[in-house]
Image: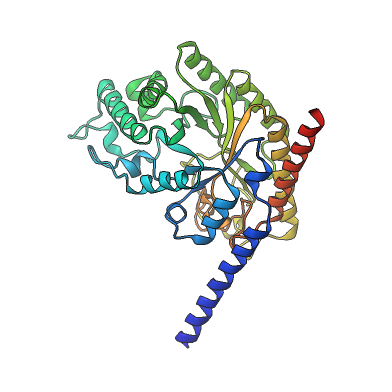
Amino acid sequence: MRLIWSFRSRAAVAALALSAALTVCAQPALKDAFEGVFLIGAALNEAQFTGRDTNAVALIKTHFNSVTAENVLKWQRIHPEPGVYEFELADKFVEFGVQNGMVIIGHTLVWHHQTPRWVFRNEDGSQVDRDTLLARMREHIHTVVGRYKGRIKGWDVVNEALDEDGRLRQTPWLRIIGDDYIAKAFEFAHEADPEAELYYNDFSLENKPKRDGAVALIKRLKAQGIPITGVGLQGHYTLNWPSKKQLAETIRAFSELGLKVMITELDVDVLPRADAHRGADLMVRYQHDPKLNPYTAGLPDSVQRKLAKRYADIFDVLVRHSDAVTRVTFWGVTDRDSWLNYWPMPGRTNHPLLFDRHYQPKPAFYAVLTSAEKAKKSANKTR
């Protein structure tokens, strides 16, 4: 019985791989559809950039011309202990992008999450002082950015530094260094690679209080001559937030500051929420509730249509502002990879991306392609 099951399992896996390969060959490529409009990117996990997930690799090579490291360039992974750098996986990620001629994005240099506790502590456990933390920040940024100089095109230098009201988030970076820690991070990154693009990245900037705070922050940085290239709107959206108007206003607000704008972590949460929380704050966690996990057997057609319409609306706004938007990166490749399967509630089955758990394109994929076709037709009319 065990041998029969094993044979059937191998046969099922082989059939899935063949189906995925045939699908990749048959469908239009996203990167080609948006050529001349903006880059199309994906955040990659280790199984993908090391080649273990061969089905996902086929999708990535076909559809995306930009890649972001999901985790391996974060401080916790690449610099886990004082004086210890673990570059093996980060090197493999960068090499994957280089070999496939992709624009490579580094994520992220300064963040309050996924940063080891030692960064903020002395050997005796006491809190470090400003000068010590600045020195650690500079050494980390120079080491990491310097290693990939000329290969990583842009860096999310500072990630999620604002609260929802637009004020600076009370992180160890702010408490120990002060308000200028953001400026210092950008200065250090520019020192390490003067040619790299440098970004501020955050979620929920589509909400006016937080957007106003980000605009004010960037104005202060620019007034000081701090080298900032662009702003990343993370794009962790739902079926009904943000509105098209909110998204358009947000793009314009940053574009008017002379910045490039990119959607850096796009997905659409289709599952019901425990409350009205929006965004991507990792501190928000809820106990598992089966009532909030209704699509374990697959996404109903009615919700597939809503998701497709939602993606169509998002991309209609993005292509209308393609003079400002330079890149759209999805946070994952298929639904099976999505972080939304375990945040803000563990053990759920979410369906937020363009490709399903079997590596097949969803109706949302074709809705996005339609937006690209509209963009090309509009461009041709204006020539």
- Residue 227 image point, x, y percent: 46, 19
Give the residue drawn at x 72%, y 49%.
308
- Residue 134, picture quadrant: top left
Q: Is residue 3 above or below residue 370?
A: below
- Residue 37 image point, x, y percent: 67, 35
- Residue 342 image point, x, y percent: 50, 53
- Residue 109, picture quadrant: top left
Give the residue drawn at x 60%, y 32%.
326
As drawn, the residue found furthest toward the right would be 381
As drawn, the residue found furthest toward the top would be 223
Q: Is residue 328 above or below residue 189?
A: below
- Residue 83, picture quadrant: top left
Q: Is residue 152 above or below residue 360?
A: above
Q: Is residue 17 left or right of residue 138?
A: right
Comparing 19 with 291, the one in front is 19
Comparing 44 with 216, the one in front is 44
Q: How many marks?
A: 0
Q: Is residue 101 among the parts visible in the rendering?
A: yes
Q: Is residue 48 left or right of residue 323?
A: left
- Residue 4 image point, x, y percent: 50, 86
Comparing 285 with 371, the one in front is 371
